[in-house]
Every structure is written in C-alpha cells, then in structure tokens.
Amino acid sequence: MPGPSAVRTPAVGVRAWLPGVLALTGVACTAVAVALGTWFDGTPVYGSDAVMGLLYPPVAALVLRREPGTRIGRLLLTTAVFGPYLLAGQYVQGPVLEHGWSGPLGGFAVWLTAWGFTPYFVVLALVPLFFPTGTLPSPRWRPFARVLVAAVAVTVLATMVRRYSDFTDAVTNPLSVTSGDLPEHVLRLGSQLTFLVGAPAGVAALVLRMRRARGMERTQLQWLTLGVTVLVLCTLGSFALDATPASDAVFALGFAAVPVSVAIAVLRHGLFDVGLVVSRALVFTVLSVLLLVAYVGFVALVGEISAGERRIAVAAAAIAALAAAAGWERAQRGVDRLLYGERRDPLAVATRVGSSLDLAGGPVDALQALVDEVARALRLPRVSVVPADPRLAAVTSAGAAPEMDVEVFGLTALGTRVGELRICHRSPGERWRRTERAAFDDVARRAAVLVWAAELVDDLQVSRERIVAGREEERRRLRHDLHDGVGPELAGMALQLERLAGKLAGGSAGGPADSAVHGDRRDHGDLGDLAALAGRLRDQMRRTVAAVRRAVDDLRPPALDELGLVGALREHVAAYRMTVAAGGPGRPGDDGGATVTVVAPDLPPLRAAVEVAAYRIATEAVANAVRHAGATTCWVRLAVTGDALLVEITDDGLGIDPGAVSGVGSTSMRERAAELGGSLEIDSAPGEGTTVRTRLPLATS
C-alpha cells in the first residue's frame, strides 16, 4: 500500500503545472484571435483585450510558481479565460452572426462570449484590494470586501444566464432563467458598482498599505502603485485622444503596466529603485487630474467650445495651468508624505517621537517606542538602537525588514559613546535629505539619553540584586553560626545548670545524719536558694535558646538547608491535609482538607536568595489559596528554564475580584521577585481559581 507521500504527490503535481497549462492555453487562444482579427477577415481585437489575454495569464503562472496558492496569483489566473473568450468572439462574429450558422460549438462560443470579459472586474476591483499579502488591509475591510466579492460574483452569474437576443437570434442560451431583462439590469448595476466603487476602494487600500508597510512589502506596493499610476495616466490620455487607434494603443500600454509591475513586485522587487519614479508619476497624475478638472469645469461654466471660439479655449487652458501650478506644491507634499513620511518636517518627527515617549514605562520601553515611531514617521524599513553596554539588548522597530544598506549614527551622552542608531535606507543607494538628517540627529540625541538612562536603571537593578544576594548569603552564614555554634553551646549550658539544680535540690533534702556530716542546718537554706537560682538560670537559658532558634528560622527557613527547596516545600504543604477544616471559606459542606501537590524535577544548586524567595512566594501563595480563597486543590510547580527558576502555583479557589485591592501578601510576593530582578504575575477571575507565576533569575546580572 503506498505511503502518504505517494498519495499526495499527484495532487501536488497538478497544482504545480495546472496554472502553466491554463496560462499557455489562454495566451495561445489570444494569439490566434489577434491573428484572425489582424490578417484575416475577423473582427479586430482591442489592444486592452490583447494585453489581458497575452500578459496577465503568464504573470499569474509565474506568481503561483514563486508563491504556490497565493490569492493574488489565483485572482490573476482568472484572466486565462480571456483567450478562449476572444477566440470564441471571432467564431461568433463570423459563422454565427454573418451566416446564422451556429455549428457544433456555436452555442458554447456564444455563451462564452457573453461572459468571458468578466476578468476585467476581478483585476480592477479585487487585485489592488488584496495585493501583495493576499489579505485585506485590516479586519474592518471584511464587510466591504464581502459585498464587493458578492457584487463581482453576481455580475459574472448574470452574464452567464442572460439572453442572447440583444446580439444574435441564431442561438439561445440554455442557461437563461428568465425571458425578461433582469440579468441585463444586474449586469449594468454590478459593472457600475465594481468599477465606480471597487476600483477606488482598491486604490484606497493601496494608499493605506503604503502608509503602514515596511521593507519588502513597501517596495512591492511601490511597484504596483507605479503600474496603477501609469494606467490612470494612459486612461486620461486615451480619453483625450478620443476614439482613435492611438487612443486604443495608449490605453493598452497603461493596461500592460499593471501585470508588468505585479511581476516585478513579486519576482524582482529589489532590482531597481522605484521610489523616485513613483513619486514623480504620482505628482504628474495628480496634476493631470487637476488640469482636466479645471479645464472641463471652466468650459462647463462658459459654454461649449467651438472652432471659432479660440479665446475661450485659450482662457480655459490658462486657468487649468494656473490651477495645476497652485496644486504642484500640495501634490508634491502629499505624495512625499505617502512615500517618505514627514521627511520634509523634522519638527513634526520630533513632536511625534516625543508624544510616543510619554506613555513609556521605562527607558527600554521608551527606546522601543522611539524606533517604532521613527520608522512610521519616515516610512523607514528598519530602525534599531544598539547599546554599547553588552548587558542591554538591541532594540529594533516592529515589523522591521532585514538589515541592508545601513547608515550608523553615534549615540553620545555626557561625552561618552553609549551606542549606535542604525537606520536602513528605503532603497539601495538612497541619499538622505538635509531635513531627514536633521531629524536623525534629533532622534540620536534622544536615543542617547534613553540608552544612558537604561544603563543607569540596569546598574541600579544589578546593585539591588547584589545587595539582596549578599544579604541572603550573610543570613545563611549567620544561621549556620547561630545554629551550629551559639545554639549548641547554650543548650549545653542549660543541661549543666539542670544537673546542678538537681544536685543542689537533692543535697538540701538530706536528713539529720547528713547534716551532721556536712555542717549546720543553716546551710540547707543556702543550698535551696542555689537550687532555685539554678532553675531560674535554666529556664532563662531555655528561653534564650528558643529565641535564637526563632532568629535562625527568620534568617532562613531551616528546612531549606536540611531538605532543599523541593523537600522543604513538600514538608510545608503536607500539613494542609490535616489542618484545614471542612467547609472552608466559600466551600460550605466540603469535607476534608486541602490537597497541595508539589511537582518539580531535580533542581541544580540555587543561590540562597533564589531559594528563600521561591520558598516564601510559594508558601504565601498556598496560604492565600487555602485560607482566603477556600481552595481544595492546589499545585506548586517548579522548573528551571534557561537562566531562571520558574515557580507556578495554581488553585481551584474562589478567585480574585478584578476590582480588589492587592493585599500585603501579594505585595510581599511581588517585592521578593523584584528584588532579584524577576517578575511575578497573578491571573485570576471570580470563580475560576488563581494562578501565580514568578520568574527568578538564577544568577545576578
């Protein structure tokens, strides 16, 4: 029986070669249709139709070969039907319409001719919406995208089921569902919705992505923007040339720019620096639209221009030129802001960076906010700050591209070099403007102060950890000294005093014969006083021993030295099964005590401070769970991951109200973790138990 790979291989093979076969079929059919319309008696093929059939399918196949399954490739592959559509059109125009003869494939040819042009809807409405990632710009676009996709689908369906009586009676559509004009109305409405709403929405999505994109995605969007801009310019030019062969050629040229730009964006997006070209093309497009609007608006106000009213035409052209001149600077600023952010205005960059730092929780967070905001404000692919102190990690802007073509700005604070500001160029060979360098210098000064502050905070934390570690190590030494030295000595003294008290008491209880031997009876009272004094000294010594033991326990739990961390915790939690009364808080009627389980592997030797902190945090969390939350089951888990000890305490108690104020126990646990440079999190919800997680570094920074 073949294995799984043998079963999947044919499907993978079909997905690999099917796009190429469909594209090749579409191109071949288009070439035949163009040849029939050019050199034979067929109907000439429009230039845009030829471009749709000859260029779009190969681009789709190349995209799918480079990125199999991508949505952009599948959308473009719908244009493979355009070649059969054009070839079927030649067949319909000849035998069917001229001679009224349908032939064996006449019905299919007419049906294909009725709807084969619909890939226009897909290309113009959907490709810009999903390029280049195959996803929408944001989840907010989903309702609109669903409506647009539904409109395209309904339009295509309407063309498939409409009647043919508007262009031939030789063949009837067997799929026609009505004899009325409903499909025609749906076709007109869907076409208008697709072109008048879908195309502008695609452009809006392109602009939105351009503002947010970084790195490779931004370069890909610039290529598509260039293609769409050329299409718009050529469309305006074709309108100006009216219905002439030159008009068709200009529109076809613009229509060809889109697949070419898509192919370069996917396959060779880093081949050329397209930023400057896109900028100039967008500005020229905006000015062309301004000229056209100003000219048409003036003509509409004055009246229709005729051959004898040249002064009106000259005035209209002059007003259009003035409008374009007035809009030049605004258009250039708008395009620059779209492509390069606020590079013309260093003060705006500084203001945005300053605002982003207000909400930062510390120097490192502020550095992250700084690089993110600089990358957004100037449309940079990557911005990073690399501190000179090896203890501090580099901070890189979110969604950054790989580091290429980097320029380095030194960071200096109080005369000391503290790191580097590394900024990637938007494209290879790009040169910064003076205003951009001014912005970078300001950012470098801010970053230097933040890096210096981060070093101070890190030094402070290191000092704090060392103080805590030294304190715990000193406590361990004191405990050993008290436990092994002072304690046994005091205990020995207490035993000797006890023996002395016993002898003195025995001597004072002797009879007359003893008195004759040892002296006068008056000595008996002295011996009794000595016995009482020895007893008091014994009791005082015992109290002193107990106080020393309490001091030893306060310095460091003795079970840690005797049993280790895991053993000490297990000994501590074993008592809960016996001490917790039935029907604890929030658990009326529950019988039995709480079950606390400690789960831990063999741990490596730990610092005294880490052992004490882990023990205190775990015991405090268990006590809170059992005594205050009424938990019946509690788990204590310990593990060493990387350079830290992880401790997790979970229970099935009542949980914590989100509005509750942190108690002394929670505050104490957080402080113990923070002293070692660790962290502590408490996750809880009413009725769902509580989880306490703490991370304690194994070594000092």
Image: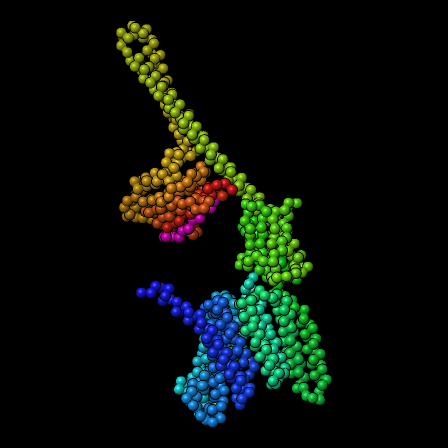
Q: Is residue 685 left or right of residue 395?
A: left
Residue at image coords 37%, 44%? 600
Residue at image coords 58%, 54%? 384
Above or below 460: residue 262: below
Residue 575 forms part of the magenta stretch: no
* Image quadrant where residue 667 sits: top left
Q: Is residue 180 visible?
A: no
Above or below 272: residue 654: above
Residue stretch in magenta: 678-688
* Image quadrant where residue 17 sits: bottom left
| Screen quadrant of the N terminus | bottom left
Residue at image coords 52%, 75%? 56
How far across and down, in percent of the image, does residue 329 sit?
67, 69
Q: Is residue 228 left or right of residue 19?
A: right
How far across and down, in percent of the image, does residue 401 sit?
55, 59
Residue at image coords 39%, 36%? 560
How far across and down, in percent of the image, does residue 457 sit?
56, 44
Q: Is residue 571 left or right of residue 277?
A: left
How far across and down, in percent of the image, does residue 633 sit?
33, 47
Residue 684 forms part of the magenta stretch: yes
Q: Residue furthest right?
A: 311
